[in-house]
Amino acid sequence: MTRLRFALVLAALAASTIAAPYAHAKTVSKNLLRNPGFEQPLPDHEWMPAGWDTSISGLPTVFFGRDTLLAYKGSYSISLANLSVLFPMGHNWSQALLVDSTSVGRKMWGKDLVFSVWTRSIGIEGRAYILLQAYRDTISKMSLVWGVDRDAAQRRLNIKPVDDPLLDFGWKRQFFSENETGWVRREVRVYCPPTVNVLFVRLGLQGTGQVMFDEASLTVEDPLPAKAPGPGENLLAEPGFEGEGNAWEFSMPAYRGMRIEVDTTVAHSGKHSVRCESGEGEYVIARSGACQVICNRALQGKRLRLTAWCKTDSLKGTAYTKIYCHTLRGMYQVPQGEQFGATTDWTKTTLEMDVPTDTYAIWAWCAWDAPVPGLVYWDDCSLEVIGTSEGLMDPPKPKRR
């Protein structure tokens, strides 16, 4: 090989080595959050950081603050402390962002949204969390545009509560239940489908103790490919509740005595199940239970099977499984699975459903209507793909004008 040819080969190798990282580099936007380090105060307010809001419970046992003693970076962090779980509630800091279809916001469609924050836990008994939500929500959108609260925007739009068009298309919550930690970075990611018009980031606590947050970030990145599940793969994390239950959403109305938690005394298999219970009955009954949100567009056009084992004890109501698909055309569902009540030993229940081809979020529920007296146990749950959709699930084609 001549010296010239050898030099050209070396140059080509060097060029490929240099170019390779850039060829696979991801595109990342700037931080979209306002006041991400909580350094700027809200004018004329003692402790609220600019750009952020808090949930409202009306309870004197919940404390929000802007902390000057402990911070991961800079001079401030934010703090959330709760002293009572008499009423089951998720208290949180939040920030809402408008996805304007006429501006740079539209460039979020088809991208991944990545939310990260540093957290510090102090004496937590329960579950703290970070949460990223992508909604198509006309009321919240207009509340941001008009600068009013959501209830006022709903009245202006004359949208009745039963007609609320709110739909979540992206939802990812990361729970963490360590009692004491130093500063830990946590991150969640969701895909942003078309028609999303408002985003929420939340930093919260379900339980007692104190959690601190600092250096939050929300960026837009190139989307990761949707992962198609393998044959027989269980799409549910922690299906037997053998851990802390942190893979599950525990959803319940804020009534006294409502509880959903991992149980170590009753199980169908393994050592744990999830126990659902409530106090005395109330006039307003709401769907409650343990659920998971699957945001995977690779499931579009598939047929799913939800399987779970249920046990009831003196239940004066009904327990059942349920699947909801959130599509660009609205929420799609099939009738609930087998219903359980009174006292029933461990029984297997199965529910199947075709996923519409414009689905972006799937909610799988192990539910019961509460509050009613009695106990419900769930265990050994699975959600798997069993084939392609058996019915026509494509969205309608647009009419020619």
Image: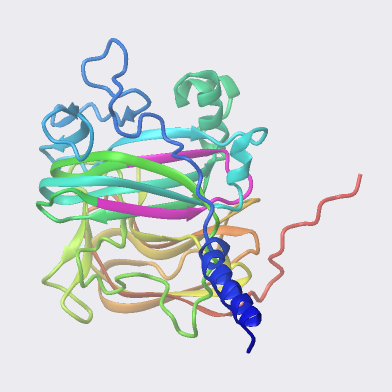
In the displayed orientation, state which residue is furthest to the bottom.
1
Name the residue rendered at 41%, 77% in the picture: 234
* Image coords of residue 303 (percent x, y): 57, 74
When the figure is inspected, residue 211 is found, relative to residue 247, above or below; the finding is above
* Image coords of residue 1 (percent x, y): 63, 89
Query: Along the line of sight, which residue is nearer the eye, 282 or 177?
Result: 177
Query: Along the line of sight, which residue is nearer the eye, 303 or 174?
Result: 174
When the figure is inspected, residue 62 is found, relative to residue 386, above or below; the finding is above
User: The C terminus lies in which quarter of the figure?
Assistant: top right
Side of 202 relative to 334 (left or right): left
Q: Read off the magenta span.
A: 185-202
Q: Main secondary structure of the magenta part?
A: strand
* Image coords of residue 238 (percent x, y): 29, 71
Colour setting: rainbow
Residue 226 in sight: yes
Residue 14 quadrant:
bottom right
Name the residue rendered at 44%, 46% in the picture: 133
Figure disc tally: 0
Query: Along the line of sight, which residue is nearer the eye, 396 or 197?
Result: 197
Residue 154 in sight: no
Asked if residue 190 lies in the magenta stretch, the reply is yes
Side of 113 relative to 250 (left or right): right
Residue 35 quadrant:
top left
Asked if residue 396 lies in the magenta stretch, the reply is no
In the displayed orientation, state which residue is furthest to the top.
44
When the figure is inspected, residue 42 is found, relative to residue 34, above or below; the finding is above
Name the residue rendered at 58%, 68% in the picture: 15
* Image coords of residue 34 (percent x, y): 40, 30
Name the residue rendered at 39%, 47% in the picture: 115
